Image: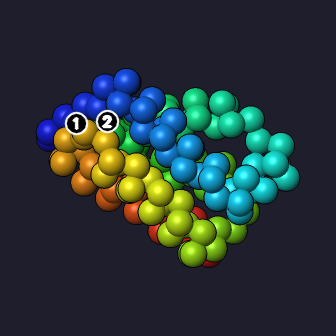
């Protein structure tokens, strides 16, 4: 199996840029405020998560990721909101200098995980 590596600097840049986009959307601004969300903590979790998504390949690892996503998102996620969230992530990846195979891999993983939590 091919090992895909995304260096930490790229992960940090991806997460920072992604949240910059999200925080321009009033829906997310309000949601984070209502939940009293610590954005820096959220970014830290996202960095760890993206690292795992990029490097983790086993079915067991994928099972863990699904459980983790469901646990962190016990509320229902509307398909249109997921679409916006994922759209922002893809847009962010497209704006960055990033290996095409990494983009593809990450897109597939996120798409799969989103399909597990969208109601």
Q: Residue at x 73, y 53 (%)?
A: 29
Q: Position of residue 30 (x, y in %)?
A: 78, 56
The answer to whether 117 is drawn above or below residue 101 in the figure is below
Dot 2 surroundings within 10 Å: few (below 14), some, or many (20 or more)? Answer: some
Q: Which mark is residue 55?
A: 2
Closer to the camera in the image, 117 or 41: 41
Provide the residue designation for mark 1: 4
Colour scheme: rainbow
Q: Position of residue 56 (x, y in %)?
A: 34, 39
Image height of 36 relative to 10, above or below: below
Position of 65 with respect to 98 (left or right) is right
Q: Nearer the viewer, residue 74 or 78?
A: 78
Q: What secondary structure is marked by label 1? A: loop
Residue 114 locus on image (x, y percent): 49, 63
Which residue does the image show at 38% across and 24% down from the upper left? 8
Judged left or right of residue 28, residue 116 is left
In the image, 88: left or right of 58? right
Per the image, label 2 sits on a secondary structure element best described as helix
Q: Residue at x 18, y 48 (%)?
A: 100
Q: Evaluate whether residue 58 shows in this view.
A: no
């Amino acid at each position: 199996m091919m090992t895909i590596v995304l260096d930490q600097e790229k992960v940090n840049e991806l997460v920072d840029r992604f949240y910059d986009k999200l925080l321009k959307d009033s829906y997310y601004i309000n949601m984070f405020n209502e939940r009293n969300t610590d954005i820096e903590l959220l970014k830290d979790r996202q960095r760890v998560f993206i690292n795992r998504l990029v490097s983790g390949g086993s079915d067991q690892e994928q099972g863990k990721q699904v459980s983790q996503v469901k646990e962190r998102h016990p509320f229902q996620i509307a398909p249109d909101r997921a679409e916006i969230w994922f759209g922002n992530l893809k847009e962010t990846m497209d704006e960055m200098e990033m290996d095409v195979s990494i983009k593809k891999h990450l897109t597939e993983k996120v798409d799969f995980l989103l399909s597990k939590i969208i109601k």
